Amino acid sequence: MKEISPRVELYVTPVNIDPRKPALPISHPLTYSIYLGKLLGPFATLGLAEDTWALNEHVLDDASFLEQCYLIHAERERQFFDALEKTPQGVCVCVFDVTDRVQHMFWRHTVPGHPAAHAYPLCDSLGTPPGLVIEDLYRRMDALIGRIREKLDAETLFLVVSDHGFKSFERGFNLNAWLYQNGYLALKEGQRESGEWFAEVDWSRTRAYGMGLNGLYLNQRGRERQGIVSPGQEAGALKRELLEKLRGLVDAQSGRVAIRDVADRDAAYGGPYTENSPDLILGYAPGFRASWETVKGEVKGAAFEDNRKAWSGDHCIDPLAVPGVLFSNWKIQGERHSIADIAPTILDLFGLQLPQHFDGRPWSLSL
């Protein structure tokens, strides 16, 4: 309930699948969601259940969004502690994503001069000063870790892992606009902009395009439906040319480097799924990210623009700028540990053979 007087205003979330009577499987086994629903009541089942875009579009305010985040987090806590209680042996895993959602939406309050800092009205009903919301959240997460440790004995391995950190998202880079301005992407006759999903792109004259948050693709003959770049020598030369121009690219307005690194997929990855990757992967510098428009294949305006949305923190940048964390109650020997080592380590602890395709290696652990 957002308002009662002078008018009634009710906010309704997007439709969630009822975990007690799922229209399609949302858990494995199928009965697990039914069990949780009957034990603990209805709970959010969307993949990203917190309504970030409702805050972006001024439908929810900071306080309402934060309240929703903590309601969903409380559901997750109850589910986790039930699973922990019923798992005397084996592996118990839970993803707590409230830290991700809150940092995405509240980072603007931690950076003086952030373009989105004054794009939203002050929220009087927010119990915590806006600039301290993230810190307060981490204090709550520390308390959660303490409650979990109280339920574990010394012979139980306890890992706290995140796959990324966070940085400010102040300026958006429209890769497709840059490609258009530099002659790599062409628009249809008489067009200077393109709507979503490359609506006005002339593929017969386009050599490269951007799609998603970090991906740059060549319009390759035999792969793309209207590809014009021949695989092999021509594609390789074009990749090198684009890599050299984009790596270290400077945002003229701010004077800051926007793209710290660019990775060639063939050098970065190996294995049977490499061909599913973009041809080049852009590693943005802190403060920058792909613009909202370029993610959807739009070509609009200048290559750089301010990010004025509440979604003001991000991690889809150069991975070296946003390392995750690893805490363990057991000692981990050696150095340079990777998140890819976690699955091999768990399998090794249970005496299971490691699949040959694993990239990671088991850790050497001691109490």
Image: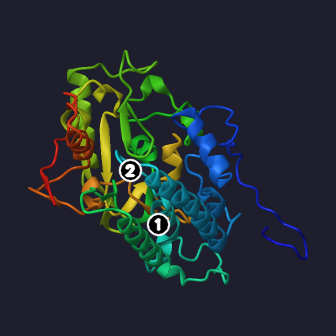
The residue at the point 52 percent across, 34 percent down is 29
The residue at the point 70 percent across, 49 percent down is 14
Q: Position of residue 303 (x, y in %)?
A: 44, 53
Query: What amino acid type should be assigned to the residue bearing mark 2?
Result: Pro
Residue farthest right in this picture: 6
In the image shown, does 349 or 265 lie closer to the viewer?
Answer: 349
- 167 left or right, relative to 1: left
Q: Position of residue 146 (x, y in %)?
A: 38, 71
Residue 88 is marked as 2
Q: Can residue 46 be seen at all in this image of the molecule?
A: yes
Query: What amino acid type should be assigned to the residue bearing mark 1?
Result: Gln
Location of residue 93 with respect to 189 vertically, above or below: below
Residue 331 is marked as none
Q: Position of residue 60 (x, y in %)?
A: 69, 66
In the image shown, does 344 or 252 lie closer to the viewer?
Answer: 344
- Give the quarter of the figure containing the N terminus: bottom right
In the image shown, does 145 or 141 lie closer to the viewer?
Answer: 145
| Mark 1 residue crowding within 10 angstroms, few (<14) / some (14–19) / many (20+) | many
* SS at badge 1: helix
- 183 left or right, relative to 44: left
- 350 left or right, relative to 30: left
- Residue designated by label 1: 103
